[in-house]
Every structure is written in C-alpha cells, then in structure tokens.
Amino acid sequence: MEAMPFDALIVPESWKTGGTQLDRIDSILRLAEPLLGVDRSRGDRAYIRRQPGGRLFITKDPRDTISFPIGHPREGRPRYAWAASPDGSERGTLAEEPPHA
C-alpha cells in the first residue's frame, strides 16, 4: 500500500476483470480504494467514471471532475496534478484552490 492516499486515479479500462459487470467494478475498486484511502467500515467508497480513450477516473467523491467546472475562475483547467506510474495508471493530487477575495 502507498504511504499516502491520492485524491484521484486514472487506470486503463483494460484492468477490469470478471464475468459480470459487478465483478468488473469490484476488480477496479479492489485496486483503487486502498490508494484513495477509502475505509468502507466508515462508509467510504470510490466512484468510477469512464473517460475517453479507454480510461477510468476514480475518486472518493462522485461529484469530482477532472477539470474545473464552467464558471470557475480556472474553468477547463486540470483540477489535479497527475503523476504517471510505471503500471500505466496515473495518480492525482488536487490542485490548490486560489484564495477567495
């Protein structure tokens, strides 16, 4: 397990395994949840969203987005600093929010 949890992950969709949709979802969650610091005993869980190019975006918050939303001062820019891993995944840390005036 990693020393500190990440805020988001992007993994190749090809990492899914299993015969049913639930098996395939669980196969990704088993990999992602420890890296995100998910504690199911506290009610935490991870949320998976498909992305273009056969990638899966995974976070602890279902409302998280890869880019800042429309109307935000940083609209369209990445919300995360991404680090590529040798296994083909990317680990993201939330970008600092600018202070509000």
Image: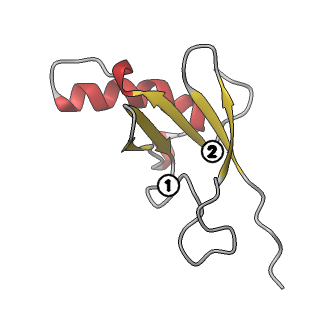
Q: Amino acid at mark 1?
A: Asp
Compared with 85, 58 (above or below) is below
- At 23% from the left and 18% from the top, the residue drawn is 18
Instruction: Identify the image quadrant of residue 6.
Output: top right
| The C terminus - image quarter | bottom right
Give percent across and percent down for residue 23.
24, 25
Instruction: Identify the image quadrant of residue 3.
Output: top right
Q: Amino acid at mark 2?
A: Asp
Give percent across and percent down for residue 58.
47, 41
Question: Furthest-left residue in view?
Answer: 20
2 lies left or right of 40: right
In whole angstroms, how far apart are the C-alphas of marks 2 and 1? 9 Å
Give percent across and percent down for residue 45.
44, 45
Compared with 39, 83 (above or below) is above
| The N terminus - image quarter | top right
Density class for disc 2 (Cα within 10 Å; few <14, some 14-19, many ≥20) is many
Give percent across and percent down for residue 54.
37, 31
Q: Which residue is disc 2 drawn over?
A: 7
Question: Furthest-top residue in view?
Answer: 86
Instruction: Indicate the secondary structure of the residue bearing disc 1.
Output: loop
- At 30% from the left and 32% from the top, the residue drawn is 25
- At 54% from the left and 68% from the top, the residue drawn is 69
Instruction: Identify the image quadrant of residue 86.
Output: top right
Q: Which residue is disc 1 drawn over?
A: 61
- At 35% from the left and 20% from the top, the residue drawn is 14
Instruction: Indicate the secondary structure of the residue bearing disc 2.
Output: loop
